[in-house]
Image: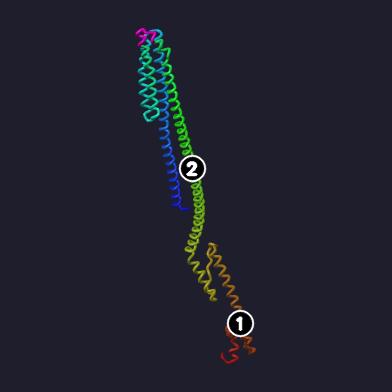
Amino acid sequence: MPFAKIKATVYYILGGIVILLTSALLFSLFSMKKLQNNLKMQVHTRTVIIALKDNLRFLLEAQTGARGFVITGDTSSLRHYNADLQNIAASIVKLRTLTVDNPTQQQNVQKLQTFGNLKLSLTNKIISLKKQGDEKTITELLRFDKSKHFMDSVRNLNAAMQEMEEKLFAQQYSVTEKNMANAKTIFIVGFTISLFITVLLIIKLIQELQKRSKAEHQLKKINTELDIKNRDLESQANFIHENEKRITGIMDVLIKTTQLDFSEKLSISDRGDELDAIALGLNTMSEEFEFHLEQLKQSEQKLNDAQRLAKIGNWEMDMNTNLVQWSDEMYNLYGYG
């Protein structure tokens, strides 16, 4: 694969990984934002539950302080009672603020305040009678026990409001768990896919590097072979350049030999190289050709002499060209000379 294509492929894969990780990160941030909101809502719900418990506790403590004053006549109990009244009022204000976005709980807070006020109104009346020393009226009020009815109403309503908040808290907790699970799943899936793509990219790069290394090794081998051949060619070229005159002489003698000219002989140097072997072989071949040619000429002369003495001749015909060749004596016999 060309380097440019490999580079483009790497960029594409890296771009895909970046996009995938960015998407996973954005989704995780979105999930974290939702998770943060859910946690705030859970904290808010738990704060409402605590405020309800505080309101009930303050009311019970106020009732205990008032009862202590009625029984013992100790005015120190009223200091705790008055402090609890302030805490009850503050808790009601806090509950109104916390449930401002929940109309149902706002109505319940109003009822809770109403029952609490009725309970406290009756308690204040008993305290006032105690201060006046009217034990008879106090006994009659305690005998009808309207205070218990108001307190039970407060308890029941407070418990119902807490139960509603607990259900809301459970729903919010379930949503939080779901968001956390989704964020975890997306992160794991995104990381796994990115890791898988990265491993594929690494494998692809390793394969390409191996191919490139193999190609480079092959190219290096070819270059080595070419260098050897170039050195051989340079050596041969140098040999030819250094022995140009000797080679030219051998070629001239070889040409003359083909023309049956054996007048020139090659000189043998003291190098004992290939050219000396060729020169020696040409000289030997030339001598043998010259000897056999002389023998052939003598045989041809003897044949001509024999034909002249016998007054006979010979001829031959080429069947392809229809050309006829006569011996010398044939020309003499027919008077052509």
Q: Is residue 76 left or right of residue 286?
A: left
Front-lying residue, 126 or 263: 126
**Label 2 CA crowd tier, 10 Å (few <14, some 14–19, many 20+):** some
Position above or below: 323 against 110? below
Position above or below: 24 against 207? above
Q: Count the marks: how many?
A: 2
Q: In the rendered image, which quarter contains the C terminus?
A: bottom right
**Residue 193 badge:** 2
Residue 149, visible in the rendered structure: yes
Which secondary structure lies at badge 1?
helix
Q: Kindly report which numbered mark, 1 or 2, lies closer to the viewer in this rendering.
A: 2
User: Disc 1 marks which residue?
Assistant: 300
**Residue extending furthest toward the right:** 310
Q: Is residue 129 magenta?
A: yes
Q: Which residues are magenta?
A: 128-137
Q: Is residue 87 left or right of residue 246?
A: left
Predominant secondary structure in magenta? helix
Q: Residue 98: which quarter of the image?
A: top left
**Label 1 CA crowd tier, 10 Å (few <14, some 14–19, many 20+):** few
Dots 1, 2 in contact, CB < 8 A: no
Identity, as a three-letter code, of the amino acid under mark 2: Ile
Percent across and percent down for residue 29 are 41, 37
Front-lying residue, 259 or 165: 165
Front-lying residue, 163 or 170: 163
Q: Residue 284: which quarter of the image?
A: bottom right
Identity, as a three-letter code, of the amino acid under mark 1: Glu
* Residue occupying image coordinates x 58% and y 89%: 331
